[in-house]
Image (spheres, helix red, strand yellow):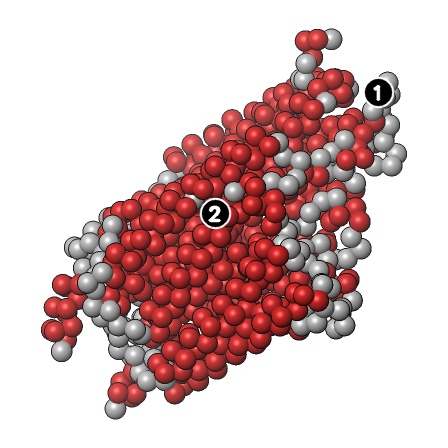
Amino acid sequence: MANQAHEETLALREQFDTEAQQKDASTLGMWIFLVTEIMFFGGMFLAYTIYRSTYPEIFAVCSSSLNVYIGAANTVVLLCSSFTMVLAVRSAQLGRQRAIVFNLILTLALGFVFLGVKAYEWNEKFVEHHIPGPGFHFEGIAQQGPAQLFFSLYFAMTGLHALHMLIGGGILTWLIIRTKQGAFTAEYMTPVDVAGLYWHFVDIIWIFLFPLLYLIDRHLK
Amino acid sequence: MITAAVQEREHYLNASYGIKSWLLTKDHKRIGLLYLATITLFFFLGGAFATLIRIELLTPQGDLVSSETYNKLFTMHGVTMIFFFLIPSIPATLGNFFLPMMIGARDLAFPRLNLLSWYLLVVGGLFSLFAMLAGGVDTGWTFYTPYSTSYSNTWVIATAVGIFIAGFSSILTGLNFIVTIHRMRAPGMTWFRMPLFVWAHYATSLIQVLGTPVLAVTLLLVLCERLFHIGIFDPALGGDPVLFQHLFWFYSHPAVYIMILPAMGVVSEIISTFSRKPIFGYGFVAFSSVSIAVLGFLVWGHHMFVSTQSVYAGMVFSFLSYFVAIPSAIKVFNWTATLYKGSISFATPMLYAFGFIGLFTMGGLTGLFLACLGIDVHVTDTYFVVAHFHYIMVGGAIMGFLGGLHFWWPKMTGRMYPEGWAKLSALTIFLGFNLTFFPQFILGYLGMPRRYHVYPEEFQVLHVLSTAGASVLAVGYMIPMIYLIWSLRYGQIAVANPWGATGLEWKTASPPPLHNFDETPIVTHEAYDYTTVMEEVIEVG
């Protein structure tokens, strides 16, 4: 096996021997990256767990001030975007370039719908004085501090999630341009594949955020 | 004649020229050298802060710097040395350079990501450097809340952003190494034929990948707290400052193993090479690296025995901390057993390896004192702790780094370093180090607290000894700096395998060709098989 047996292509970079090895490495790399993301979000989930168990009643009251219908609708939007992402990956496997672009644009659009709804919700918090800081006020609670903690965590967690959505949007845009340039074929579609993994991961984070932030002890009401 | 022949052969250093060929390189060997230059700069910067600290401590009064400046000095010494020198030291330089070669690969799995990692370290470093030049930061490298979030009037944000960015450099390096070890091994390079250096880096990468993101999110929360007063660490709003300590040490205790595990990998290579024996108990040493990485995540609470942590949690953390001694001792005993009946030669790398074993053993045993609840309460935040972790980080990690640098210098540069000077500097560093830090054990046990620049007069003799040792240590670090640079031009030309070592990296020319090997090697033997090396040496003559 000679050392520089092959010219470098997208599907076979010079450090790899076979295309399968390259695809394996890229996929493994993305999975490990997602593990680091779990640890990254994990710090905030830990803080949430501790403060929710310290102030269970206040967290329940604050949680019920969030609009559960908007949150639920947004969850559906995000799940649909995951579905279109899967369709994009499948189109890539079949080498159907136009279908890839179509599905990626749909995914991107659904992602922006989600972010738009999120922005509307954040704006509501401004109006209601539920933004942590000197102007914070939550009606009907004696301890304003822990109430503010709930909203701090709400903004930190949904904010970090939204940041990941924005990064995902950037990746999708890049993929759309590259697909139009004809970079992906049925033989080489690793970037679409690993971007799909990332997009689903960001979805799953929301699947955990939605019940933790919106649905606390709702049955008690 | 020989020089002419060497100049003709194409290798990674003369394959292309110019600043762009370095700043845009995807070659793991060149990126390793970029890292080497970067961390050397940070090492001497951190060393300059240490020098000022030691000069101030010559006298019991605060006559060189004010308390505020002193706070900044020890903070910036810690931040520079830990985040910008020790964490990237061995993995990003020697690991980057030799990990792919040792498993017979042409490069890491993601060369562009590797280059990005270096840029992230540089950008992170610039942020921290800016903070230092603009006025410094005084929280201690630990950034304890609520001081760092509510009270400190120094450049906490710029420093934290710098560390945050550099953290991603560390994460991506770890990710790259794990994928490379899983997917890029040459034919025949099974997991249990890998050199122990590679095993050590696998364990290190696990910590980098699992621990560093937690530090990142912790710093993010500190930034939010400082900028927007969100209350997570603020008791006034019902938050808990101790939560910060938990999150911080969840990374920062395993981070110690990011610094020491690669050094242990280096020592395994050196001990085997210069006693001409396979490492005794290869499997045990390999798995001891992994178990140190795993146990490292379960002991963070021993930094918090005097915080509000529950005393029962303290007992569990104390108990688990003792467990780290087991894999550590396995390594030390197996290195010693490797030496038994070995054909030992005292080349410079071997001197550093011996230094490592001695100093690491002292650092480790005093670690057991600190894992013990009762003693720890007595010596918490004293010079005993300072001495303990310098024995691990300087006596361990830097000895390993310098040993590895000398060991692989011929391969990296194609030149030999001057052996006499190198031995002298190894000896100087060992003596200087002990003179600097041994008195600090006594100081701490007598009650001298850390992070104070004014102290009672009866401590002065020990402080003077320590400062004298630091001067010797500084000279010891300067000598290699000078002769290594000198050797680039005037050093003796190195052959492919000057030490008669067994790793794949020695089976290719010095310096290596652009793609490491002329032909992808096929591995047929276990690691450290000296019979085949002897045959090859005899064949080549």
User: The disc numbered 1 marks a residue on which chain?
Assistant: A
**What quarter of the picture does the C terminus of chain B occupy?**
bottom left
Residue B451 in the image, given as x and y percentages of width and height: 68, 58
Dot 1 alpha-carbon crowd within 10 angstroms: few under 14, some 14 to 19, many 20 or more: few
Establish if B31 lies above or below B173.
Answer: below
Residue at 31 percent across and 64 percent down: it is B270
Give the left or right position of residue B417, taking residue A159 as reference.
left
Q: CA distance from mark 1 to mark 2?
A: 49 Å
Q: Amino acid at mark 2?
A: Leu
Residue A8 lies in quadrant: bottom left
Q: Which residue is mark 1?
A: A141
Q: Which residue is mark 2?
A: B368
Q: Is residue A169 visible?
A: no
Q: Amino acid at mark 1?
A: Ile
Q: Secondary structure at mark 1?
A: loop
Establish if B272 lies above or below A128.
Answer: below
Residue B535 lies in quadrant: bottom left
Establish if B93 lies above or below A26.
Answer: below
Q: Secondary structure at mark 2?
A: helix
User: The disc numbered 2 marks a residue on which chain?
Assistant: B
Residue at 55 percent across and 40 percent down: it is B373
Residue at 30 percent across and 87 percent down: it is B3
Give the left or right position of residue B266, taking residue B317 as reference.
left
Q: Could you confirm whether marks 1 and 2 are on the same chain? A: no
Residue B505 in the image, given as x and y percentages of width and height: 29, 65
